[in-house]
Every structure is written in C-alpha cells, then in structure tokens.
C-alpha cells in the first residue's frame, strides 16, 4: 500500500510563514514589514495606472483569445523585456537567447537547469552572504552546489568589498557567480560603479560565469537605465552573462508571474542552438508560460506613452520608499538618539536594520510588527500613519 507516513512537516517558509502570523494577528496596530511587495501610503497594494490602462486595452481587443503561448513566450514581449535590460544598442550588437519565464524565480530555475546540463566549468554557484532566502534551494533543485562569498560587513553595515574580492579570487576558475544587479535583497547594499569595476576585474581574470538576478530594475534609483548599468557594463566588457528579470516589483505584477531569462551567446548559430535547448528544458518543466500578465507588461513596453507613464510611476514608488527611509532615519535620530546611517545609505525596497532575531521576535510579540528574523524590513510597508509607531517600537527594543 502507498503510505506517506514517513513524510515530516517542512518548516514554514521564513518569509511567507511570517505573513501567516501577521494575518492571524488581531491587533489593530499590526504592521507587516516582512514581504517585499510595494504598498501605497495607505498601506494598500497599488495597481499601477499604466497596468490598469494596459489591462483595459487588452480586454477591449476583439481578437483576444486564450490559446497557448509559444514555449519561450510571446516574441514581442521577450524582445522588449530584453531591450529594457540590456538597452537597444547592446541588443543589436550581441546574440541573446531568451525566453519568457515564470517571473524572476522561474528565470533563475531555468538558468539553474541550463547550468546543470551544459556548463563545462566548475558547477558551483557562489552566492552573496547574505542573499535572498530562496537562492540556494533554486540551484540545489537543479543539482548544483552553492557556496557563499562575503558581501555584507556587519561592522560598517555596508559592502565588504575586500572580502568579496578575496572570495571570488579564491573560487575555482570558471565558477558560477550570482550577482544582484541592483537593490540587493536583503541588505539594500549595492556596490558603487568603481566597486563594480573591481568586481568585474576579478571575475574577468578567473573567467567566472555571471548570473545576474535583476528582480528590482527601476526600484533602486527610480531609473531602469541606471539600475541596469552593472548588467550592461559586464556585457560591454565581453561577458556572456545570464540574466533573470522580474516584472513582479517594478510593474506590481507579483501574482501574474512575468519575467524573462536571457543569456548572451557568441554567434547567431549558438543563439539558435541555445534557444532550441531552452525550449526543451521549459517544455518538460511547465510547457509554456502564462498569457495575461505578459500581455500587460508587453503592452506597456511596446507603447511609448504607456512606457513613459510607467517610468513616472516607478519614480513615484521608489520616491515614496526613499522618503520613508529618510523619515525613519530622522525619527530614530531626532526622537530616540539612535544614529543608524545605514538605514539612509541602503537602497531599494529593504533596509537591513541590524536588529537581531531576539529584537524581531519581541517586535512581533509585543508590538505586532512583523519583520524577518535577520532584521530586514520592507520599507514599502511604512507609511505616514505607522512610521512613528515603528520608530518608537524599534527604539524600545533596541535600547
Ligand atoms: N530575486 C530576488 C533577489 C528577489 O528578492 C525576488 C523576490 O523577492 C526574486 C528574485 C523573485 O521574485 P519573483 O519570482 O516574484 O519575480
């Protein structure tokens, strides 16, 4: 007889588990700072007006249908997504194999599968310490090993450039290195352009393969161009990077699972071969990607007016996050004499507060504020109505 009696319950996901605890909390003051999803100043999810407009346009289209997508997704969407990442000039100058993916996670999963099957170097993926909690599992699922390189300096709460360069220097030649393109999750610490230059040099020297994870294009600085700079710089330097793009955060299309996987190839022939093998990988994993979300994203990317509107909305989201970041810093400093400069120096959706696991547990139990136990907060969960309470509570547990 079949039995599943040997199956033990898995531990809850560190982030989604906190969300469940938040939902079960009945206190009116409760605040969710754990999930990396944008909220407006009323604490509500925001459907971007450009997205609403694209939805309307799609629904008005008499020819719309629900046929299958091609295995690698809609060509127009993929072409425009890739252009958003690399820029038109590099797209014209390089041979890029690409496929629509199940958001950023799906793009990384396809990358992992690809590397497992075809990478001839050292099949070990170097991840920053710390990194997004799902990264190790995604690569392990494809049979790859992971190791870490130093990234965050707990003393300065900034980049440990020296440690990072040393670790990448000591990795076996031709290893795989995962880099967050911008708005590093969970630390909010990104290298400067000069620091990127030094990272590029070491990676170049040892011919490591780079997998860029770009889940937050436009969220770090408000500009998709500026945020994509590291990716483009590596490609300009001749690297055959792989790239995982997500439209979850920058278009607010979280549940629609819209993303793109791409890889730079050396020739048109190589690109064609790689794309045909990508199709085989995808066909066996999920057959073809979903339609509606990528139609929305595709409509925005293909229409210059809608695209311009989306850029403004991106600035609005990153601007509100930035303003909350500065307000939190100022409240902690002026009201509570806590000087946490890292809060204002970090970038993107998160702040890595430096609060320990004990502080975070106390914040949930006594103050109904939920954040991951590593002290990461989603700044987007802050607003004019709750920021003072959050600053007061942080100060109360930190002192
Ligand atoms: N990579 C990083 C660094 C992330 O923070 C996230 C989401 O939080 C993802 C990838 C994947 O997100 P999604 O699969 O929703 O696009």
Image: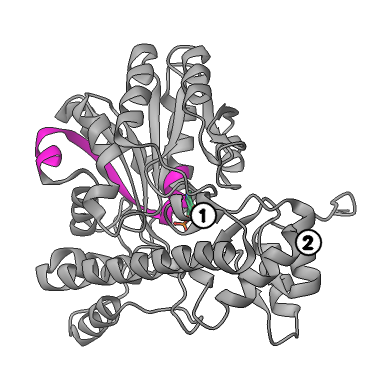
In the image, the segment drawn in magenta is: 89-108
Give the residue displayed 42% in from the left and 16% down from the top. Answer: 174
Crowdedness near tag 2: few (<14), some (14–19) or many (≥20) residues, C-alpha within 10 Å:
some
Residue 240 sits above or below residue 311 on the image:
above
**In the rendered image, which residue does mark 2 sit on?**
361
Q: Position of residue 397 (x, y in %)?
A: 75, 62
Q: Secondary structure at mark 1?
A: helix
User: Residue 188 shows which numbered tag?
Assistant: none
Residue 100 belongs to magenta span: yes
Question: Counting residues from the N terminus, which is met first, the one under dot 1 or under dot 2?
Answer: 1
Tell me residue 25's x, y (percent).
75, 80
Seen from the viewer's position, the closer of residues 50 and 314 is 314
Q: Position of 6 compared to 295: left or right? A: right
**Do the numbered discs 1 and 2 sit on residues whose CB atoms are within 8 Å?**
no
Q: Secondary structure at mark 2?
A: helix
> Residue 298: x percent and y percent?
23, 65
Residue 24, quarter of the rendered image: bottom right
Give the residue drawn at x 58%, y 47%.
134
Residue labelled 2 has its Cβ within 8 Å of some atom of ligand 1: no
Q: Position of residue 301 (x, y in %)?
A: 19, 63
The residue positioned 29% from the left and 56% from the top of the image is 73
Task: Name the residue carrying label 1.
Answer: 343
Decide if residue 34 is in sight here.
yes
């Amino acid at each position: 007889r079949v039995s599943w009696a040997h199956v033990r319950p898995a531990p809850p996901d560190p982030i989604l588990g906190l969300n469940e605890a938040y939902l079960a909390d009945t206190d009116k003051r409760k605040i969710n700072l754990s999930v990396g999803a944008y909220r407006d100043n009323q604490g509500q999810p925001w459907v971007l007006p450009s997205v609403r407009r694209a939805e309307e346009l799609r629904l008005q289209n008499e020819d719309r249908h629900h046929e299958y997508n091609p295995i690698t997704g809609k060509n127009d969407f993929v072409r425009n997504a890739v252009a958003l990442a690399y820029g038109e000039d590099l797209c014209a100058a390089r041979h890029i194999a690409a496929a629509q993916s199940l958001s950023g996670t799906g793009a990384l999963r396809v990358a992992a599968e690809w590397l497992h099957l075809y990478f001839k170097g050292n099949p070990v993926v170097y991840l920053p310490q710390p990194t997004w909690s799902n990264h190790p599992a995604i690569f392990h699922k494809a049979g790859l090993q992971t190791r870490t390189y130093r990234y965050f300096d707990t003393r300065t709460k900034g980049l440990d450039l020296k440690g990072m360069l040393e670790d990448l220097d000591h990795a076996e030649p031709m290893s795989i290195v995962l880099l967050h393109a911008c708005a590093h999750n969970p630390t909010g610490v990104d290298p400067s352009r000069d620091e990127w230059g030094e990272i590029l040099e070491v990676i170049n020297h040892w011919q490591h393969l780079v997998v860029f994870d770009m889940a937050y294009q436009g969220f770090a600085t408000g500009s998709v161009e500026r945020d994509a700079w590291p990716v483009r710089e590596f490609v300009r330097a001749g690297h055959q990077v792989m790239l995982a793009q997500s439209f979850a955060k920058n278009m607010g299309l979280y549940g629609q699972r819209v993303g793109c996987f791409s890889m730079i190839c050396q020739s048109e022939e190589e690109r064609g071969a790689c794309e045909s093998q990508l199709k085989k990988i995808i066909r066996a994993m999920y057959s073809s990607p979903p339609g509606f979300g990528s139609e929305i994203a595709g409509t925005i990317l293909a229409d210059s007016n809608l695209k311009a509107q989306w850029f403004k909305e991106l600035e609005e989201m990153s601007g509100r996050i930035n303003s909350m970041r500065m307000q939190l810093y100022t409240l902690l400093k002026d009201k509570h004499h806590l000087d946490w400069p890292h809060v204002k120096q970090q970038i993107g959706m998160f702040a890595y507060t430096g609060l320990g696991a004990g502080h975070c547990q106390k914040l949930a139990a006594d103050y109904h504020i939920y954040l991951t136990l590593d002290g990461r907060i989603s700044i987007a969960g802050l607003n004019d109505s709750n920021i003072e309470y959050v600053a007061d509570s942080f100060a109360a547990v930190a002192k």
